[in-house]
Amino acid sequence: MKKLKVLLLLAASASVLALAGCQKEADTPTEAKVSEAPAGTEGAAQVSTGEVIKGTAVTQENAEQPQTDPEGMTRSYLTGKLVSSEIGSKRPVAIMLNNIIDACPQAGISQADVVYEAPVEGGITRLMGIFEDYSNLDKIGSVRSCRNYYVKYAEEFDAIYVHYGQAAYAVDLLNSDEIDNISGLEYQEAMGKIDGYAGEDIFYRTDDRPSPHNCYTSAEGLKTAIERKEYDTDYAEDYKGHYKFAQDGQRSDLGIYGAESAVKIIPGYGVNEPWFEYNSGDQKYYRFQYDDKQIDQNTDEQLSYDNVIVQFSPWEKYDDNGYINIDTFSGGTGYFFTGGKVVPVTWIKDEGTAGAVRYYLPSGDEIVLNQGKTWVCIVLDTDKDSFVYE
């Protein structure tokens, strides 16, 4: 395991904070390098063809070349892939998802294009799935309560935020003009009215799990709530997107930046003890937790991601009940994993409360993600030593 290398790379990454806004020309594109299948990853799902995905290695220069999209199509802000203009122009929804073992497997999570995982009280993690196209989903969840830092992450994507309940510390933010939210609760004692409540028919409960782990929503429920609240469904005119993606036919090959091999990622969360295993056949990271594959209840398929980001974040304790507040503004260090490789990064938030976090390489270049889905692990900066990769 790479605990020592983690510390060394963190030191190198921290030295480039001042350079993060700079852009630097990269070397001439080279043939993409592909890692061999890692030993000991028999549990990871395998693609049927076994073929390695290849492409021209992406550089800062060719990543920024304009692409001509077919008529009626546009580039997804969340995946970099071509989607219909009708879908790609619409704001996503960011849905809070329960992640304790009694709530697993989650339903619909495999259709989230970006997933955030962060600690909450008691050492458990909660997930937030950001969905671009959820129109075919009758069951999404189970849906759980808000923590204020998740609202900030949702804002980075101009998303409509969906939750069932909230911590008291999040009420003022939820009731402000800063976020459009859909709440499953209209009123809570000692918290007052929640402005995002849109009716009791937006969420529903099932009888296969005990409350509060059995609350779900659907595409129809979300559509109804958005209409009742009269939220704008199109992206804001000044929204610029969150990530830079490799273009069609390209692969973001971190080897040109001196990256190390990374075929297993262990974020270090204590309760669910998750990890990711890299499959060189389809160049995706497969997700595990609670000593098993993490699957989608709707499909029985294991979750997999093209990009994994680890973001170390400062934090503070709110009270003796264990509620915490994670700093989403101050910046810090982290890691970017794609294609079986890893590089250290620094993260810096754009100006403004809703500005997106940008991730920069030691060279000062902004990272370029491979097209596809992304999982973001928010790790408390005091827990860095628990994070390892192999």
Image (cartoon, rainbow, N blue to C red):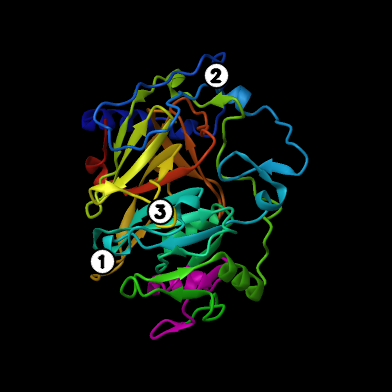
Residue 272 on image: x %, y %: 25, 53
Residue extending furthest toward the front: 48
Amino acid type for the residue under numbered disc 2: Ala
| Residue 252 picture location, percent across and down | 50, 27
Tag on residue 296? 3
Residues in magenta, as a range: 163-192
Task: Write the residue at 61% across / 27% down.
Answer: 63
Q: Which mark is residue 322?
A: 1
The residue that label 2 is drawn on is 26
Label whose residue precedes the other's in the sequence (3 or 1): 3
What residue is at 26 percent from the left and 40 percent from the top? 387
Amino acid beneath label 1 = Gly
Q: Within 10 Å of the Cα at label 3, are there few (<14), some (14-19), or many (20+) other Cα atoms?
A: some
- Position of 97 with respect to 272 (left or right) is right
| Percent position of residue 367, x then y | 50, 32
Whole-number angstrom distance, CA of label 3 to CA of label 2: 39 Å
Comparing labels 3 and 2, the label whose residue is closer to the camera: 3
Q: Is residue 67 left or right of residue 30?
A: right
Of marks 3 and 2, which one's residue comes earlier in the chain?
A: 2
